[in-house]
């Protein structure tokens, strides 16, 4: 690995100050599972200085707040897997976290790092999009909260400006307990990037799908929603046939590529199957009370 500078931030405010000081030449280091491999194995020059945020306590932790479920950017995938509050209010987040890499990667890798890599196959993205999550960003001119969907711009490119830091992810209060499920298909059961991943959520109202949300990974330049499939479901009676048709529609919204892992056609077929399974999984997760409202 080529030499690089190193500074450690005490907290998020200090991290923003350090990022402002070093500007374009600085790169944030969280768990390092992606960044260090990138610095070691890619030919482009390393950052001038790495700003290590791993000791910033205010970026850690999972808690219920007035806004909803707050997950600090530095929260590791293992912490999400083992969080009682996640299992209570948004268990699909734990389903997505537990399939990331192996236990060593989950112990170091963070939710903020996962989102900031902005690779289309990221496993945190689809479930958070299905929950319509928000993200808070800190920068030299203060903090702003935006929909997560606005973070993703292109492969490995987010909307964060130079000097900005991802602080937290918020699942809005209105979407806590929303029946949601995540599906991933890789070439192996473990330690495999997704060929396709998908998440789905919906409420039910008088037997009809209400506010269905479908998100897809690894089939477009970024993680995406499937608005046509969502529109198809909205207001329709809950049924297996409707779930299957939504999967078929979502497959037409995907724009997968063919690469050494799989063909575009195979990925499209996977979208249809995984969306159907995610919708069925969300339905399985609905409480008896929610199901009663749907009958
Ligand atoms: C063996 C292995 C297996 C893996 N398997 C999977 C998998 O199955 N699924 C999957 O989704 N990913 C997988 N990954 C990728 C990676 O582990 C995850 O994306 C992880 O969550 C990255 O988090 P991190 O804290 O390690 O990020 P880092 O490596 O520290 O940072 C990643 C990027 O995000 C930036 N960054 C980090 N935190 C912030 C912040 N708070 N604000 C602004 N920028 C920030 C960094 O500058 C860097 O560009 C795997 C990686 C390895 C090495």
Image (cartoon, helix red, strand yellow):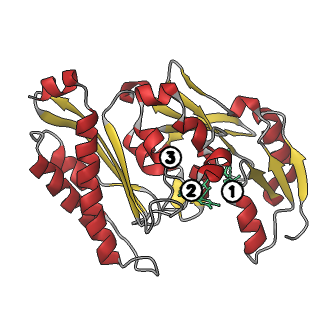
Residue 63 pos. (x, y %): 56, 24
Residue annotated with mark 2: 101
Q: Which is nearer the N-term, disc 3 or disc 1? A: 1
Label 2: state its secondary structure: loop
Label 1: state its secondary structure: loop
x 61%, y 48%: residue:
106
| Res. 143 visible in picture | yes
Residue annotated with mark 3: 98
| Res. 211 visible in picture | no
- Relative to 148, 242 lies left or right: left
Residue annotated with mark 1: 33
The answer to whether the residue labelled 1 contacts the one labelled 2, judged by CB atoms less than 8 Å apart, is yes
Residue 110 vs 66, above or below: the answer is below
Residue 270 pos. (x, y %): 30, 65
Is ligand 1 within 8 Å of the beta carbon of the residue shown at mark 2? yes
Is ligand 1 within 8 Å of the beta carbon of the residue shown at mark 1? yes
Residue 46 vs 227, above or below: the answer is below
Quadrant housing the N terminus: bottom right
Query: Marks 3 and 2, how far apart in space?
Result: 8 Å
């Amino acid at each position: 690995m080529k030499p690089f500078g190193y500074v450690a931030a005490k907290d998020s405010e200090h991290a923003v100050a350090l990022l402002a000081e070093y500007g374009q030449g600085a790169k944030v280091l969280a768990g390092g599972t992606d960044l260090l491999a990138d610095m070691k194995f890619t030919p482009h020059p390393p950052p001038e200085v790495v700003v290590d945020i791993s000791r910033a306590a205010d970026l850690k932790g999972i808690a219920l707040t007035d806004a909803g479920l707050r997950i600090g950017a530095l929260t590791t995938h293992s912490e999400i897997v083992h969080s009682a509050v996640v299992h209570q209010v948004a268990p699909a987040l734990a389903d997505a976290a537990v399939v990331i890499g192996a236990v060593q990667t989950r112990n170091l890798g963070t939710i903020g790092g996962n989102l900031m890599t902005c690779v289309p196959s990221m496993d945190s993205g689809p479930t958070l999009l299905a929950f319509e999550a928000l993200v808070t960003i800190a920068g030299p001119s203060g903090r702003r909260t935006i929909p997560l969907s606005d973070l993703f711009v292109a492969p490995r490119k987010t909307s964060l400006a130079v000097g900005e830091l991802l602080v937290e992810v918020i699942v809005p209060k209105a979407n806590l307990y929303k029946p949601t499920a995540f599906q991933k298909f890789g070439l192996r059961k473990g330690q495999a990037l997704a060929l396709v991943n998908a998440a789905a959520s919906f409420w039910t109202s008088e037997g009809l799908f209400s506010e269905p949300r479908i998100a897809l990974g690894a089939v477009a330049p970024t993680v995406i929603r499937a608005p046509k499939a969502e529109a198809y479901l909205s207001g329709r009676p809950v049924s297996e046939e409707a779930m299957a048709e939504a999967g078929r529609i979502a497959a037409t919204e995907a724009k997968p590529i063919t690469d050494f892992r799989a063909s575009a056609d195979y990925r499209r077929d996977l979208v249809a199957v995984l969306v159907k399974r995610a919708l069925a999984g969300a339905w399985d997760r609905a409480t008896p009370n929610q199901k009663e409202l749907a009958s």
